[in-house]
Image (tube, rainbow, N blue to C red):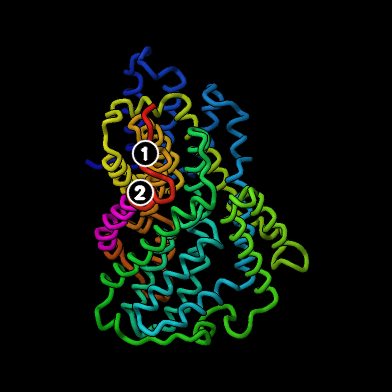
Amino acid sequence: MFINARQSVALCVALSLSGLLLIPVNFPGLGGQGRITLVVFTLATCAWIATSLDDTGIALGAGLVLVLTGVTSAEAFFGTLGDPTIWLLICAFVLAATVAASGLAGRCAAFLVGGARTVRQLAHLTTAALVVSAFAVPATSGRAALALPVFLALARTLADRRRVVVALALLFPTVILLSAVATLIGAGAHLITVSVLWETTGERVGFHQWLLLGLPLAVVSSHLAAEVVLWLTTRRADRRAPVRITPEEIERHGDRPVTGPLTAVEKRCAALLGAVVLLWSAEPLHGLSPAVVALLGALLATAPRVGTVTLRAALATVPWSLLLFMAATMAMGVALLNSGAAHWLIGALPGGGVPPWAFLAVVVAVSTAAHLVLQSRSARSSVLVPLVVAAALGAGVDPVSAALASTAAAGFCHTLPASAKPVALFSDVPGVPTYTPTDLLRLSAVLAPLTAALVLLFALAVWPLFGVAPQGENP
């Protein structure tokens, strides 16, 4: 007998509430606020999983309940909207709007792929271009929307090579998702992770530190994924076949000019974006917050006679619903930790005797599979990161290493078309052959264990070189 979504969420809620009510009132480490937080978090998670209700509405409702019950203060809840990470993302979207309006992104993509001489080179140059786009456009859905016209131009140019077009259709969302870890603004989940770490441990992971840890992982995982996609979707003859794509061809099949010298607007946009990224990366030298740098760049990018769009038009492109969702889930994550609920949930786990590699292996495995339950990347981080941080503190594992490993592993969400917006966007492109759900399952069967192993390798062997070692201190 099958049950529908409403019945499944009702069952989930009933079991969760009954289980919480059976907890002794004087259970060590779990007070009244902890109980309330667990109930609210359980209800919100069940609603995210099993209902069609808006994710942001669920998060705001959950946050409101936490305020009304006294678990968190109104000032703390509403204060998350003023968090520097929220401002960083707002200004990054403004900068992205100017890049999109200038046409610079399409020109850079045409320049890169124009150097390909074989299908394999085309795949890896496309991968490189998509990795670079993480510095210009925040959030994976925005990068997917910006990259779609480039894919369409390539698909029309290679219309006589169906398998190659399908490979590119699969490559674009795959790399967009895996390369998001390159930068702090690559996904909203990153900002939630940084906020939870700051509120819990007092450690601030800045743009430059995230860059050092995330960019090498993004580059390696993206190019590894490109090889996997080619291996699964094309034949050896396809990969070795010569290919020649000129900027003129991309321009003919695209919707923006990509040939000729850079315009004055494109030059200004490139210089401004380069300066912003440079200042972000050099934060330890000048001490300016990334949010302040982003705000300065956003104001210059929308200034009269300098920018490509007005500030009003750029702000209209900001996904305010996403920002509200992030702010609410940040508050929920902090409440889960401060109320003692997270520590109670992981209280049954072994203490400091757990080897760091074993702890991180479990964290990476759970985070990699979490997209099968929670489709929203930000929701996954809001649920997982507080629990991972609490468990890491109890197990003697560095919470920064554990939280970053969880967030990086949660970037894998390729199994189903509905698992991520970029996957859904490229799965149904009118007039262009694209991949099927079976293709995604085949890709996931190979790529999931590979990316999980890669994240674990970086957490254990690479990140310690940059000062983030897995071994922490027992409380």
- Which residue appears at 61% of the width and 85% of the height? 260
Q: Are marks 2 and 1 in contact (CB under 8 Å)?
A: no
How far apart marks 2 and 1 lie (CA) works out to 40 Å
- Which residue appears at 41% of the width and 38% of the height? 399
Total numbered badges shown on the rendered structure: 2
* Residue 51 shows in this picture: no
| x and y percentages locating residue 85 in the rendered image | 58, 45
Q: Which mark is residue 93?
A: none
Circle nearer the N terminus (2, 1): 1
Helix, strand or loop at mark 1: helix
Q: Is residue 431 above or below residue 380?
A: below
The N terminus appears in which quarter of the rendering?
Answer: top left
Which amino acid does the dot numbered 2 rest on?
Answer: Ala
| x and y percentages locating residue 440 in the rendered image | 30, 62
| x and y percentages locating residue 109 in the rendered image | 51, 75
Q: Which mark is residue 6?
A: 1
Helix, strand or loop at mark 2: helix
Disc 2 designates what residue? 459
Q: What type of secondary structure mainly makes up the magenta span?
A: helix
Q: Is residue 408 above or below residue 106?
A: above
Horizontal arrangement in the rendering, residue 363 relative to residue 213 (left or right): left
Instruction: Say which of marks 2 and 1 sits in front.
Output: 2
Horizontal arrangement in the rendering, residue 201 relative to residue 101 (left or right): left
Which amino acid does the dot numbered 1 rest on?
Answer: Arg
* Residue 108 shows in this picture: yes
Magenta residues (range): 442-459
